[in-house]
Amino acid sequence: MSNIILPLRDEFVLPTNGEVGATEAHGSPCVYLCGNSLGAMSQKSKQLVQEELDVWGTRSVVAHFSHPHGRPWVSYTDNITPLLSEIVGAEEKEVACMSTLTANLHLMMDSFYKPTSERYKILCEAKAFPSDQYAFASQVRARGLDPTRAIIEITPREGEYTLRTEDILDTIEKEGDTIALVLFSGIQYYTGQLFAMEIITRKAKEKGCICGWDLAHAIGNVPLSLHGWDVDFAVWCTYKYLNSGPGGIAGLFVHQKWHEIEKPKFTGWWGHELATRFEMPPTFTPTPGAQGYQQSNPSVIAMAALLGSLQVFKQAGMMGPLRERSLVLTNTLEQHLLRSKYFIPLAGSQEKRGFTIITPSESKERGAQLSLLFLPVGSGLMRKIFDTLVSFGVIGDEREPDVIRLAPIPLYTTLEDCEKAAEFLEKAFEVVT
């Protein structure tokens, strides 16, 4: 295990304890378990970004067509699309590297959410990421509908934190004739639950619903097969598990069966076919497939950062080997946490001082994340523990008011990191209680 992970870890720049504000061992690398919020920077990304800055300085506009490293800016996405399509399980023409996650979500919903008087509802998980909730509500209102009637949010059963697949399928079966769009997160950002994407997609299609996915927390985290699962569309960001940097460029997927049926509605210059794009014709001719949805020319600097990370993915063998490493790391972290004297089982007393894990315990139902709920709920314990962990050099992600998410990333997290995180959590409890 470590013989595989350590060389990959060397491919990344990880902050030291001193750089993240820890009070101990300033020169040592921190325990970085926050790649589900912002992935670490790869050495390759740093190199490629610097190369593009140098090309900008030495070639300027000429680099659109004449590039010293063979990456002309006009076709830069040609370097990225094959790697992205492999990661999401798609044909190259089904994938576009473009824009931002929520902008792409709006583009896809505008094209695929077509409510009628009988079939007008959107089915999603309750407490989806806020940006998705805002997008759903605004798309519904733009069509003159009431979000309180048109959006069905499935909630966990009483006393549970995650959704049961059977409850999702039952809802689709019962409400399917009124559902226009089924749109879940591939992985729920708060709990870390991996939804049964293939099964849910199949059920949605059986009931005549369009099925899309927000893959912000799934891409680069778990294996995907969007084409094979017959997903209609999907969107994602790349700054989490794909390590493209803060605010990195996003992407989308449109199944090839829609390419001749659902043409881009809000068109832009960069979506025009490349052969005549620079002839500036007055009539739009879309690039075939998903890339016709492109609007403005994308940031080369942002694409270089993404390309560098994707090349490391390729070096690692892509999602099959990475998923294997991820399972070992996440299971190892879980085992360390379960041995803590402050761990409280989900069925245990919610009044005790400690933590429980609300992420599914089954490996097949989660990605590279464990969400720790600190008890008693509303006690303010999470904030004290989080700040203390930072002082020890353990960087997770806090979700107010009571959750800390820890994500062991297979590209750069080690087994030692998992052990240290659990040890420092135990120490944090000793300090704050």
Image (cartoon, rainbow, N blue to C red):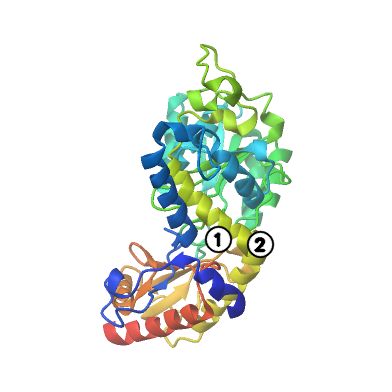
Residue 84 horizontal/vertical position (percent):
60, 47
The picture places residue 173, in percent across and down from the top left corner, at 68, 43
Judge whether 35 appears above or below 307 on screen. below
Mark 2 highlights which residue? 317
Q: Is residue 320 left or right of residue 329?
A: right
Of the numbered discs 2 and 1, the one sitting upstream in the chain is 1
Q: Which mark is residue 2?
A: none
Q: Is residue 217 visible?
A: no
Which residue occupies the foreground of this view, 215 or 128? 215
User: Is residue 201 visible in this depiction of the protein?
Assistant: yes
- Name the residue tied to disc 1: 193
Instruction: Judge whether 300 appears above or below 346 on screen.
Output: above
Instruction: Classify mark 1: helix, strand or loop.
Output: loop
Label 2 to label 1: alpha-carbon separation: 25 Å
Mark 1 crowd level (few <14, some 14–19, many ≥20, 10 Å Cα) = many
Image-based side of 395 in relation to 278, left or right? left
Q: Residue at x 58, y 32 (%)?
A: 291
Q: Residue at x 42, y 43 (%)?
A: 55
Name the residue: 61% across, 71% down.
325
